Amino acid sequence: MNKGENLNQLCRLATAKLDDLLDTLNVEYRICNKGFCGKCPVHDGADNEQGWIIYQSGYTVPGFWTCFTHHCEEEYDKNLLGLIKGIRKQGPADAIAFLEQFTKTKCTQKPSVPEQYIQSMQYDILEELEEEEKNYIPRSEARQNLIIPATYYINRGYTKNTLNRYDVGYARNEEIFPHTSNRAVVPIYDDTGTYMVGYSARIIYERCEYCNKYHDSGPCPQYATGAKWKHSEGLHSGDILYNWWSAKYYIKTTGTAIIVEGPGDVWKLEEAGLHNSIAILGSSLSMKQKNKIDICAPHKLILLLDNDEAGQKATNSIVHMCDKLYNMCIPPLSANDIGNMATKQIQKLLFPFVKG
């Protein structure tokens, strides 16, 4: 075995051979930007092909990973050692022993140290080694390069006015909106609504009941790679509250913030006459997102996360984070999410909470 290294360096040695490590752990993966992605290898029953990613570079802590559906990294830590603990269901000492065997290098830290060490590492991983140059696109330019509105969402019941307000359309220019063919583009704007900081693009096809992939009505392709959503490179959803540029005024004046998961939920609430909704673009509320809400100082939070396991977990997490600061309301949904409810249903459900 090679000379001793500290835990951080041990993880770096393993991350340099990340594909071999994932093979050793029997993880199915695909190569993607700066790392590998696929179904989350930690929680049981994972079926989302875009539900997990591990980065090989770009973060100060080696092996930074995220589970986008169940957020397993919050339970096992967001670094390479945490991933090994989660996959193998081991404690830190056994996970370190696995790393030692894989890298053929002795760890100089005692098994009692890693838990404290890991806690100190977690707060560093959000700082990238090199700050990416931010070339944000003015909103007017983004609109010029989109065909608005997207008929896909009109067919799903959204109005042209709503889609025009939020600039939802199809890409004219794939240099600005790359990899968005056969997708409806949802621009995401900064806190002032002046610049586009990124976008999400929803495939216009539904999930096939035979192959469980998203494709057109033809025969199931042998390799269906179309994920439901694609997001622009470098989009950090945990830094953003979708619709914040518009909703923050109404949150201040009404004293109420409505928290949902995605843009479609915001649009439906807008159509119901509720203008104080914000989307967390996922199933967890980050501290950066919470801090923005705190600035507006609402007295009430209405949680309308999706009516599924991930949504329930997110709701519980937000309640735990915020219940000492705000009055929390969790109206019962009659559908899987707000985006699938009719306007009158939404008004009947929410007006008592908003006006109460």
Image (tube, rainbow, N blue to C red):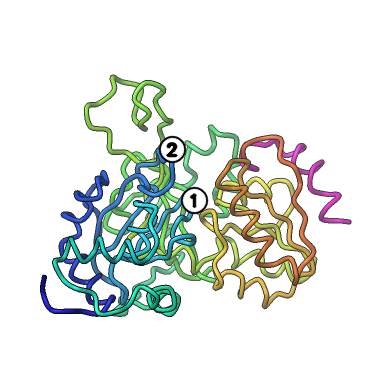
Relative vertical location of residue 110 with respect to residue 83 in this rendering, above or below: below
Check the picture and name the quadrant holding the C terminus: bottom right
Element at label 1: loop
Q: Residue at x 21, y 51 (%)?
A: 31
In this view, the residue farthest toward the left is 2
Q: Residue at x 67, y 78 (%)?
A: 295
Q: Nearer the viewer, residue 201 or 176?
A: 201
> What is the x, y in percent for residue 54?
31, 59
Q: Nearer the viewer, residue 191 or 31?
A: 31
Relative vertical location of residue 199 with respect to residue 271 in this rendering, above or below: below
- Which numbered tag is attached to residue 166? none
Relative vertical location of residue 283 with respect to residue 340 in this rendering, above or below: below
Residue with the mark numbered 2: 45
Q: Is residue 16 magenta?
A: no
> What is the x, y in percent for residue 124?
40, 79
Q: Which residues are magenta?
A: 337-356
Residue with the mark numbered 1: 70
Relative vertical location of residue 320 with respect to residue 158 in this rendering, above or below: below
Distance in Å between CA atoms under marks 1 and 2: 11 Å
Q: Nearer the viewer, residue 191 or 142?
A: 191
Q: Is residue 348 magenta?
A: yes
Q: Nearer the viewer, residue 338 or 332?
A: 332
- Left-right relation of 136 to 18: right
Can residue 126 be seen at all in this image of the molecule?
Answer: no
Of pointers 1 and 2, the one earlier in the residue sequence? 2
Check the picture and name the quadrant holding the N terminus: bottom left
Element at label 2: loop
